[in-house]
Amino acid sequence: MKHLISTKQFTSQKSLEKIFSLADSYKKVKSADILKNKILACIFYEPSTRTRLSFETAALKLGASVISTENAAQFSSAAKGETLEDTIKIISGYADAIVLRHYQQGASKKASTVSSVPIINAGDGAGEHPTQALLDLYTIKNELSRLDNLNIALAGDLLNGRTIHSLISLLSLYRADTLYLVSPESLKIPKKYTDYLNNKKIKYIETCDLQESLKNIDVLYMTRVQKERFKNIDQYEKVKDLYSIDAKNIKHMKKNSIVMHPLPRINEISPDIDNDKRAAYFRQAENGLYIRMAILDLILNNKKERKI
Ligand code: NCD
């Protein structure tokens, strides 16, 4: 794996199993000095808490050093008018890999065409967020001990939610029972993703009714309505609070189901359910660290013999 731009790069369960088993090892050992002398650059043009800090933590735990800019739009030469390509060309002369978050769809792909080092897509506008989808799938596997025969609901902003876009391709590598795509009409998943599901013969139901699917599902994956992608704030206000899960409606979910969210949550999940054992979102966020350690190991550590 050189660049990690899209989850479409994963075409078999086997390639995912390798990442998951490395993540399992890192969950146990917590750190390993395998990336000494490597430098990771984290270049973020959009806000982030989990993605940037877990990548930086992952790098430090593996013995690498980190250079980063958390607000590249304002504090890098982008503010002076430098192109993304020029910025990436320069940084790829300093670092051994670049984790990039950008507001434009396709930015990571564009960066990968000029970079001499691996680019890891940490979110490109409303495009994709592949490392989030990897940790999401890893979480489902850890929580439910399987990835086949699951009923999964993806709910919220399916139009702009890049974590959803990346997750769909990974889920389609497994034999899901039914995928419930829950959103208001204006935030429906783009057609290219339903085409993809049709191609892979994955059964899905598009609906605006979350309540209806609750009793059937093993996984509820909630998402935030992506305010920053709206041109018109009134449109956002209309759809922002359509779906939420709380102590009342979680009662309709199966005892051994889970609730996930890439976070940050706004009103999609009530803190009232944080102590319910089905609330998996904080465990999900922690898994991000181990998955990102595994990804950095695979991308930056060229040794055939892994130390762990
Ligand atoms: C997500 C993102 O940035 O796409 N956050 C994250 O990385 N955990 C989801 C979101 O911002 O809603």
Image (cartoon, rainbow, N blue to C red):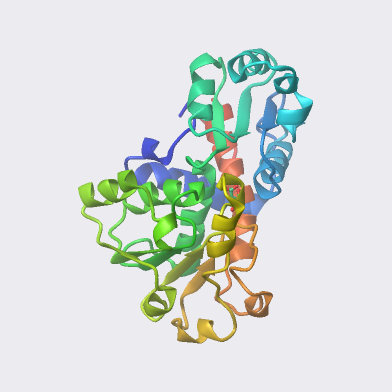
Number of labelled discs?
0
- Foreground residue, 40 or 60? 40
Residue 251 placement (x, y as % from top left): 51, 86
160 shown above or below 152:
above
- Foreground residue, 169 or 12? 169
Residue 248 placement (x, y as % from top left): 56, 86
Q: Residue at 46% x, 79% y: name it.
A: 256
Residue 261 placement (x, y as % from top left): 56, 61
Residue 177 placement (x, y as % from top left): 28, 66
Q: Residue at 39% x, 66% y: name it.
A: 152
- Residue 301 visible in the current orientation: no
- Residue 296 visible in the current orientation: yes
Q: Residue at 48% x, 26% y: name it.
A: 109
88 shown above or below 31:
above
Residue 92, picture quadrant? top right
- Foreground residue, 161 or 282? 161
Image check: 133 left or right of 88? Answer: left
Q: From the image, which quarter does the C terminus lie in? A: top right
Residue 8, picture quadrant? top left
